[in-house]
Image (tube, grey):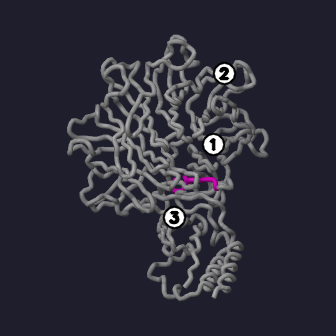
Amino acid sequence: MEKYLVSFSVLRRGPRTFGSRLASTGKVLYSQCPNHQRSEASFRPSIWQSATPRLIAMCLIATVSTFTLPEQLEAQLVSYQTILLTGDEAPTPGENTSFRGFFNVVLNETGQLAFNATLAGAGVDRTNDFGIFGYSDGKVNLIARAGDSVSGFEPDVTFSSFGGGFGGPVLNNQGQTAFLATMIGTHLDTSNGSGFFLESDGKLNLVARSGDLVPGAKSSVNLGFLFPVVLNDLGQMAFLAGLTGAGVDSTDDRGIFFATSESVRFVTRSGDTAPVTELGTTYDGFDVPTLNDLGQVTFRASLAGSDVDFTNQQGFFVETQDSVTSLVRWGDEAPTTVAGDRFSNITRIARNEFGQSAFHAFVNGPGELSRGLFLDSNGSLDLLVRDGAPLPSAESGVHITGFSTNIALNNVGRVVFKGFLAGAGVETDNRKGIFSAFGDTLELVARTGDVAPDTEPGVYFSDFATPVLNDTDQIAFLAHLSGTGVDNSNDRGIFATDTAGNLRLVAREGDLFDVNPEPFVTEYRTISGVAFVNDSRGNDGRPRSFNNAGQLALTIGFTDFTGGLFVATIGVPEPTSSALFGAGCFVLLCSGKRQ
């Protein structure tokens, strides 16, 4: 019998009820209703196997036509894939262990995942209940686990912990995973027991370790305390480290490094001369660097010298082809229409694959501009959004009065940020917003006091966390909610824009969620918590959870103390019931012509 394969449509079944997505080869459109569960035992293959294609198509049309009312069957722009649930078997060879919790889940462009997880089972204790795992092509693999031996060391040397308190792994688009780990065992202590590892094609390599001699140093200088590592798609890494050894003091005890799986080299060190106009100006300290896919290392540094004061004491610098240049600095001239306007404070910067930089800065000078968002495109610096810019809506007299320091920049040059409003009618409960800026266009994505989409009437936004952005201009963020029926059991949710720019609910505390990936079985649980990683601000080598296919990796906890790891896909609108009806009729006509 010829079979018709119809993509499994992921649907939101009535208010506050979500279904998960099945990725299988035998895909059948199946509509599950909120109050009807179909068990595997009640499914009768013999009836379906004997049905003709025409009968199947008629059943599909009848199903879709029956549930066209929004309260019964609403086509959802968000689909869900269940990756793992607590209690699922963990890939720990020779042991009967299961997953107990998931954290710091990151995602690449091909849909691969890396994450931290806690474990439970016979033989699991505090020394081996934590690990880093990967997910690819439907399979979960162990990358590293506390208590496991570390290759290349004495037999008793084992992993002790991961992340060093800084979070989870970094995953690039080649499927490589980088992470910071601490080790215990023979000849190891706090001075030499931590290191950066890179997993590639199932092989784990130690890239750099505390206590290692620093290559290129003028004397015996060792790596000390290690900060988080960043990783680009070329497999290159950058990191900040403390320095110890002969002659090292508080003026030269920090360094920025560039690394591959084969080598580590200095980018710069505190005490080195900074590339600025004032003679004798040196680096005094650093923040953790970023690294884009051009191999450019960008870092913020504080400065010291006779000509350095509070007006020019910090700046951002970039290394390109082994040469460090100043990107932007406090005291630099701001690109305004008034001569003498200068930057007075720049806290964070976002970078993309094409060398563009976006940042928030305060401005001092004779002009009226006090702060704004700026975009540097390979040396051409422009004011993107200014303090006082009118709200991009019909509402008059409302303007932007401040910016969050954490902004996101994609490879198209779009900037997304959290901002603050002032003006007529602005009060405490409606003064915050998520904004998107591209060229001369400023858009309001969401505002506190606005109705939260896909929620009950009377529920509105009350606050926002830092948003993330992909290269197709989709935006995702965690929001706090207030209003009718909202309490601490349902006051947080994840929202994202689809490819048409429509804002959709991804997951909310208090909602029912179907964790079972099978299309004919439902298993509803009530959400108690939602989270996703929002570390990355662009093409910066930091952990990412939102890719260009609109996939968002998230963790969900449930009120029965279980949890899961899921991938939500925020895509394009589903076909209407009329379109599905027409498609079904076309199938019937075509099937009638076949002999």
Q: Which mark is residue 303?
A: none
Q: Closer to the N terminus: mark 1 or mark 3?
A: 1
* Residue drawn at 52 percent across, 60 percent down: 510
Quadrant of the rendering where the C terminus is positioned: bottom right
Going by the numbered disc 3, the residue's amino acid type is Phe
Going by the numbered disc 2, the residue's amino acid type is Glu
On screen, residue 496 versus residue 528, left or right, reads: right
Q: CA distance from mark 2 to mark 3?
A: 53 Å
Say which residue label 1 marks: 416
Range of the magenta residues?
Answer: 487-498
Q: Residues within 10 Å of mark 3 (few under 14, many from 20)?
A: many
Q: Residues within 10 Å of mark 2 (few under 14, many from 20)?
A: some
- Residue 494 in the magenta stretch? The answer is yes
Q: Which mark is residue 333?
A: 2
Say which residue label 3 marks: 513
Vertical side of 34 occupied by 115: above or below: above
Q: CA distance from mark 1 to mark 3?
A: 29 Å
Q: Quadrant of residue 190?
A: top left
Q: Position of residue 252 (x, y in %)?
A: 40, 20
Q: Secondary structure at mark 1?
A: strand
Q: Position of residue 52 (x, y in %)?
A: 58, 87
